[in-house]
Amino acid sequence: METYTRYERARIIGARALQISMGAPVLIKSEKIDPLEIALEEFASGVIPITVKRKVGI
């Protein structure tokens, strides 16, 4: 698993939670109802299909 900064982690989890709240399919089996908690579980499992592009050399 790639190492993310705390800002990247927050952005990924927040974006995924928003997707889930708007009706996107959940990628793991979860008993949770809150989109943020589901997004946190997905992030911990490494199944969130979001990538981070970084500028190099700045």
Image (spheres, helix red, strand yellow):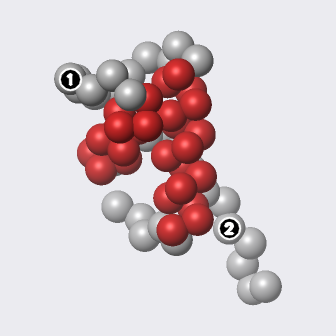
Residue 19 percent across, percent down from the top left: 56, 27
Identify residue type, mark 1. Glu
Residue identified by numbered label 1: 31
Horizontally, residue 15 falls left or right of residue 31, namely: right
Nearer mark to the viewer, of 2 and 1: 1
Q: Is residue 47 visible?
A: no
Q: State if disc 1 and disc 2 touch (CB < 8 Å).
A: no
Q: Is residue 11 above or below residue 30?
A: below
Residue 32 percent across, percent down from the top left: 27, 26
Residue identified by numbered label 2: 54
Identify residue type, mark 2. Arg
Mark 2 or mark 1: whose residue is earlier in sequence: 1
Q: How many numbered discs sit on the rendered protein? A: 2
Quadrant occupied by the C terminus: bottom right
**Is the residue marked by circle 2 packed among few (<14), some (14-19), or many (20+) residues within 10 Å?**
few
Which residue sits at x=49%, y=24%? 20
Q: Secondary structure at mark 2?
A: loop
Q: Nearer the viewer, residue 35 or 3?
A: 35
Residue 57 percent across, percent down from the top left: 75, 86
Horizontally, residue 23 falls left or right of residue 30, namely: right
Q: Is residue 42 above or below residue 53?
A: above
**Residue with the most extreme right position:** 58
Residue 30 percent across, percent down from the top left: 23, 26
Residue 1 badge: none
Which residue sits at x=43%, y=29%? 35
Which residue sits at x=53%, y=22%? 21
Quadrant occupied by the N terminus: bottom left
